[in-house]
Amino acid sequence: MPTLIPGDKAPDFTATDQHGKTHRLKDYRGKKVALYFYPKDMTSGCTKEACNLRDNFSTLKKKNIVVLGVSPDTEGSHKKFADKYELPFPLLVDMDKKILRTYGVWGKKNLYGRLFYGVYRMTYVIDEKGVIQEVIRKVDTGDHARQILGAIGQAV
């Protein structure tokens, strides 16, 4: 699994969101992108994180930050999640885990001694030129927008 660090060019990708709309990372040149990876729709931590981003979405948008969520869930699952919690940003489908693997967020996890493969909760903050500006490895699900803004030197 590659380890991407600040200064690396963010790998481009193409994926569809909860509405079937296609997104390409390169389409967001000129804007900052908070590319956040989360394990599963409708789970407590993922819901808390998504709702924090939703509640601070207008602030992020004013700072020219595009929020893109990525998980291996289906389009239908993403749609239910986004509709239930009124999420104003795209949730990208990565069922084949290509984006997850490219960004190094898919791998072995250990939960109470049980080993399994899953998504590492991480966020890549990508600058206007498509370069990784910051990697947030220890996501605070209840205050993630603040972490993203801090990564670009801004305050909530």
Image (cartoon, grey):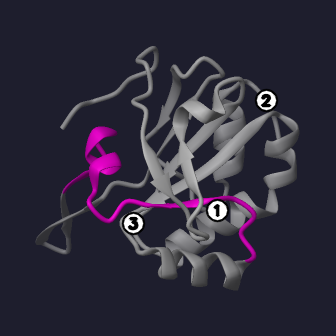
Residue beneath the point at 64% across and 33% down = 28
89 magenta-colored: yes
Query: With 43 as the anchor, is 86 left or right in this view?
Result: right
- Out of 112 and 145, give the one closest to the viewer: 145
Query: Mark 1 falls on what kind of element?
Result: loop
Query: Of the numbered discs in the image, which one, if any, rests on residue 154?
Result: 2
Q: Quadrant of the C terminus?
A: top right
Front residue of this view, candidates 141 and 74 = 74
Amino acid, disc 3: Pro
- Give the residue type at disc 2: Gln
Residue of label 3 = 39
Using residue 61 as the reference point, say whether residue 146 is left or right of it. Answer: left
Give neighbour class at mark 1: few <14, some 14-19, many 20+ (Cα, 10 Å). some
Q: Residues within 10 Å of mark 3 (few under 14, many from 20)?
A: some
Please tell me whether mark 3 sits on a helix, a strand or a loop. Answer: loop
Q: Which residue is mark 1?
A: 142
Residue at image point 61% right, 70% down: 19
